[in-house]
Amino acid sequence: MSSKPNLIYIVSDDLGYADLGCYGGREAGFGPVSPHIDALAAGGLRFTEGYSNSPVCSPTRFALMTMRYQYRLRGGMEEPINSKSKGSTTLGLPTDMPTLPSLLREAGYATALVGKWHLGYPPTFGPLRSGYDEFFGIMAGGVDYFTHCSGKGDHDLYLGEASHREVGYLTDVLSDRAVDYVQRMAPQARDGKPFFLSLHYTAPHWPWETRDDAQIAAGLGNLFHLDGGNVESYRRMIHHMDEGIGRLVAALRDTGQLDNTLIVFTSDNGGERFSDNWPLVGGKMDLTEGGIRVPWIAHWPAVIPAGSLSTQHCMTMDWSATLLALGGGQPRADVPIDGVSLAAVLQDPTHTFERPLYWRMNHRSQRALRRGDWKYLKVDENEYLFNITADARERANLAAKHPERFAALRKDWLAWESTVPAIPEDAAVSLGYSYKDMPQR
């Protein structure tokens, strides 16, 4: 067995903070929603105050890949990259940028992405051009689960950079590929060459289709699926993903790789229409807690004590920095990373350290800074100060009560903003729907 762990980075899409049983989620009519993910949490480490780098998908993925604030790259300032960017030579992850997979590959890892890329289209961009040996999945931000077509109507399932046709419900198809990858890589992992697998599901992102809803795809005119879905079908979509993760864990166990594999599970941002973010307010596209606080679960039997809990503050790029450090990868000196390794927390979940976290959104001119118990927030022209530890729902604005603290955090955020490029005027905000489609949450 390799002394380096195998690394699996599982990212769900638009999953709410409390959608999982292990984060307080309720059972569905069919029973527990996420028993296999809950088992990973029970056998490992669950974070209660972990965040995504953005409240929308592609910016978070820029941070995940580069271990840097997404605002450092032009594509990372789209909210999010949309299907109109196909053919763009600027809206994507530059191929000369060092990435988590490219640096792990330099450290001796086999690398693969199964699932969603959403960081620009070939021939200018693509997973195989940014450090992955293998790619099977979608390039767009979302596709139909049965036709595998994007919002533009074009087929968007790829094997490498070649269009690939495969019959099946996308969540199951991705799970099958991930299981196959683990089984293929197990022999060389035993011989000393570990693997890094990014498994980036589209579930439970719209359209609202379960495994039994192929008939919906036939009549679907818009992937946003504004006239469809419900809480029960949404939970079933999560359950399908959970079943696939269960099969992946079983494959690791059957091939003798489970003990020496670090599995990290999260979401790219907070929940959307049918998600449960309790007790948090807001969701996707918001810098309130419901848009950025997400599940973070780490499972590594050889290192992490079962049943562990952590209140450590962290965000997506920190986990990528953690995987890089554990895999023996080295950041490039001329491209320093912003992520901070959490390796010490994995070994001792009681260990915490101060980790200030900064966000910025073009949408509604939002700002946020979390430092310790406190959070500075701006939405439109309104500014707030919250004690998040005491008030996770962000209901009691303490800016007038603690003016010095408010001023200090605001100054801190402005100082940070001066270190990243300004948002260009042509950066897009793509909402897809508005309050005319559904009431404010």
Image (cartoon, helix red, strand yellow):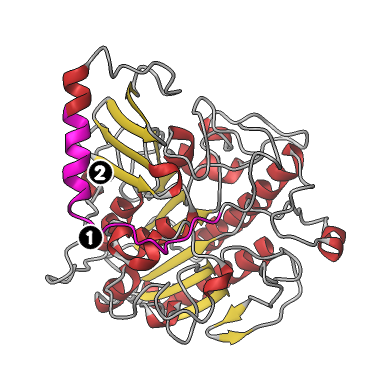
**Which of the labelled discs sits on residue 347, or is there none?**
2
Residue under the point 44% across and 77% down: 127
Amino acid type of the residue tagged 2 in the rendering: Gln
**Which of the labelled discs sits on residue 325, or is there none?**
1
- Residue 6, relative to residue 41: is it above or below? below
Q: Position of residue 242 (x, y in %)?
A: 61, 50
**Mark 2 falls on what kind of element?**
helix
Q: Residues within 10 Å of mark 2 (few under 14, many from 20)?
A: some
Residue under the point 71% across and 73% down: 153
Q: Determine which quarter of the picture holds residue 194.
A: bottom left
Determine whether, in the image, residue 400 is placed left or right of residue 436. Answer: left
Q: Position of residue 96 (x, y in %)?
A: 28, 80
Q: Quadrant of the C terminus?
A: top right
Determine whether, in the image, residue 42 is placed left or right of residue 154. Answer: left
Amino acid type of the residue tagged 1 in the rendering: Ala
Q: Which residues are magenta?
A: 408-430
Q: Quadrant of the N terminus?
A: bottom left
Q: Position of residue 221 (x, y in %)?
A: 79, 62
Residue under the point 66% across and 39% down: 33
- Residue 256, relative to residue 370: is it above or below? below
